[in-house]
């Protein structure tokens, strides 16, 4: 089904679009400068990943900008049915635009896993509650541990992974090792926008599991469509942009982000003696070296001064994913 601009919600706020599609792109290297030009033309911010297996990313712009970008992408027959999940942000969700070339659009590290060839059964949000309440269904959160910590579905298993690359090993150790009579009859998986759980279903089918399901459109689509009073979601959903989290109805959440370790933090965390804005939080305070504290403090000072001058601090960007054991101050922001 070809998409049209009627699918894009009109708003005078910043519009965030989370999108992905597994599709064969042998020319993904040549696509990069074309996509960059389109993003620049329509003043789009965020990150898009291109690989031979498809496209993935989250972007932000004005309503007119997103319309311009999506209209341009839809002209390519391979992207004609690309259907982003849209939400709003009170401020720009990103500070710059990056188009990256990757081996995978979501990194599992397993060759030959192709959702276009083999994939689990899509379950729309309206049917999700029934599936995960079935006692024969094992519900697995395919996201990372810090995402699980601030919100998940009732009864969902936390694989305690810090990256999606760790998921296959968790399956080997915890599911494949089970005797046949103890293996789950049904497996239902979910993630933020659908890409991780979609690829996870392809992997699970490759491993010999038969009834494998995944939430179509991910948590974002569920929170958009399912009323809170009927929802089985508890907490908030972590998003990889400057909103940090969203709630039911895709309203902006209550979490902030520690820009040293990039862990989500609450207002209670901010009242801790271990919290220093832009420098540390209870999660990382005891792991920082004096040199890191000094560096982060100077960076925060420059951010504050730039804000007072009504300028954007050029170093203000989201750092890479959280690390449990240490803080990578060379990439934190």
Image (cartoon, rainbow, N blue to C red):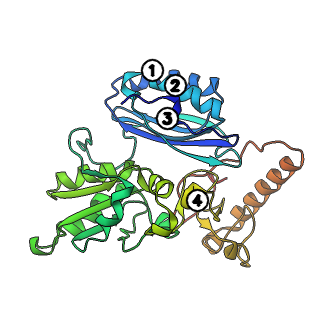
Return the residue nearer the eye: 328 or 58.
58
CB atoms at circles 4 and 1 under 8 Å apart? no
Question: What's the CA distance linking mark 1 and mark 2?
Answer: 7 Å
- The residue carrying mark 3 is 100
Q: Residue furthest right?
A: 309
Question: What's the CA distance linking mark 1 and mark 3?
Answer: 21 Å
Residue 2: percent from the left, percent from the top?
Answer: 39, 28
Question: What's the CA distance linking mark 4 and mark 1?
Answer: 32 Å
Q: Residue furthest bottom?
A: 273
Q: Which image quadrant for residue 104?
A: top left
- The residue carrying mark 1 is 75
| Residue drawn at the location 21% of the way across and 64% of the way down | 186
| Residue drawn at the location 71% of the way across and 78% of the way down | 272
Please tell me whether mark 4 or mark 1 is closer to you in this view. Answer: 1
| Residue drawn at the location 67% of the way across and 70% of the way down | 281
Q: Which image quadrant for residue 166?
A: bottom left
Please tell me whether mark 4 or mark 3 is closer to you in this view. Answer: 4
Crowding around mark 2 (Cα neighbors within 10 Å: few <14, some 14 to 19, many 20+) is some
Residue 174: percent from the left, percent from the top?
Answer: 24, 70
- The residue carrying mark 4 is 245
CB atoms at circles 1 and 3 under 8 Å apart? no
- The residue carrying mark 2 is 71
Local SS, label 3? strand
Q: Residue furthest left?
A: 180
Local SS, label 1? loop
CB atoms at circles 1 and 2 under 8 Å apart? yes
| Residue 324 seen in the current view | no
Q: Which image quadrant for residue 290?
A: bottom right
């Amino acid at each position: 089904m070809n998409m049209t601009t009627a699918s894009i919600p009109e708003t005078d706020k910043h519009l965030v679009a989370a999108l992905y599609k597994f599709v064969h792109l042998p020319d993904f290297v040549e696509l990069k400068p074309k996509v960059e030009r389109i993003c620049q033309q329509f003043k789009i911010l965020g990150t898009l990943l291109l690989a031979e297996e498809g496209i993935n990313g989250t972007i932000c712009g004005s309503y007119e900008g997103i319309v311009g970008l999506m209209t341009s992408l839809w002209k390519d027959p391979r992207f004609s049915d690309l259907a982003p999940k849209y939400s709003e942000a009170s401020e720009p969700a990103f500070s710059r635009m990056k188009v990256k070339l990757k081996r995978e659009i979501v990194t599992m590290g397993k060759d030959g896993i192709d959702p276009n060839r083999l994939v689990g059964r899509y379950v729309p949000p309206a049917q999700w509650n029934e599936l995960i309440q079935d006692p024969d269904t094992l519900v697995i959160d395919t996201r990372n541990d810090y995402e699980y910590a601030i919100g998940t579905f009732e009864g969902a298993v936390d694989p305690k992974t810090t990256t999606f690359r760790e998921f296959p090993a968790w399956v080997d150790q915890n599911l494949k090792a089970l005797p046949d009579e103890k293996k789950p009859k049904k497996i239902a998986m979910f993630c933020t926008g659908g890409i991780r759980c979609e690829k996870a279903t392809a992997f699970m089918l490759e491993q010999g599991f038969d009834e494998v399901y995944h939430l179509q459109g991910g948590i974002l689509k569920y929170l958009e469509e399912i009323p809170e009073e009927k929802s089985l979601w508890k907490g908030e959903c972590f998003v990889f942009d400057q909103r940090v989290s969203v709630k039911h109805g895709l309203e902006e959440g209550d979490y902030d982000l520690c820009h040293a370790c990039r862990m989500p933090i609450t207002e209670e965390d901010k009242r801790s003696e271990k919290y220093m804005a832009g420098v540390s939080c209870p999660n990382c305070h005891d792991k920082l070296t004096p040199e890191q504290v000094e560096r982060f403090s100077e960076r925060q000072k420059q951010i504050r001064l730039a804000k007072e001058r009504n300028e954007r601090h050029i170093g203000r960007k989201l750092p890479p994913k959280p690390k449990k054991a240490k803080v990578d101050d060379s990439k934190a922001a």
